[in-house]
Image (cartoon, rainbow, N blue to C red):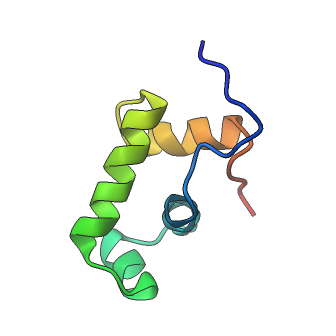
Amino acid sequence: MEEFSSRSVLTGREREIFTLLIADNTTKEIAGELGISEKTVRNHISNTIQKLGVSGRAQAMIELIRLGELSID
C-alpha cells in the first residue's frame, strides 16, 4: 500500500467538492455552490478517484475518510 506523507492527498477544491458530496449534494448543487461548471466538478471527482486508485465516488469517499482526509459531521 502506498504511504502518504503528512501532506494532504486532496487539493483545496477537491476537499470542498468531497465535503459537499459527503453532505449529500448533487454535482449540479456543488457546481452552483462553488460557481464552477458541472463538468469541472466531475473532473475534480475523476482526478481524485484516479489518485486514490478506487473505482467510484463512494469508494473515494470511504477511502478519504479512512485516510483522515474527510470526516462525517
Q: Residue at x 35, y 31 (%)?
A: 55
Which image quadrant: the N terminus?
top right
Residue 14, position as x, y percentages in the image: 50, 59
Q: Residue at x 36, y 46 (%)?
A: 47
Residue 20, position as x, y percentages in the image: 53, 69
Q: For this rendering, which residue is in front, 60 or 13?
A: 13
Q: For this rendering, which residue is in front, 6 or 66?
A: 6
Q: Residue furthest left?
A: 39
Residue 72, position as x, y percentages in the image: 71, 57
Q: Residue at x 40, y 40 (%)?
A: 49
Q: For this rendering, which residue is in front, 10 or 66?
A: 10
Q: Is residue 69 above or below residue 11?
A: above
Q: In the rendered view, does 38 fall on the left or right side of 29?
A: left
Q: In the rendered view, does 31 fall on the left or right side of 39?
A: right
Q: Residue at x 38, y 87 (%)?
A: 35
Q: Residue furthest top?
A: 1
Residue 17, position as x, y percentages in the image: 49, 65
Q: Is residue 32 above or below residue 54?
A: below
Q: In the rendered view, does 36 fall on the left or right side of 11?
A: left
Q: In the rendered view, does 65 fall on the left or right side of 56?
A: right
Q: Is residue 23 above or below residue 61?
A: below
Which image quadrant: the C terminus?
bottom right
Q: For this rendering, which residue is in front, 60 or 8?
A: 8
Q: Quadrant of residue 38?
A: bottom left
How many numbered markers are drawn? 0
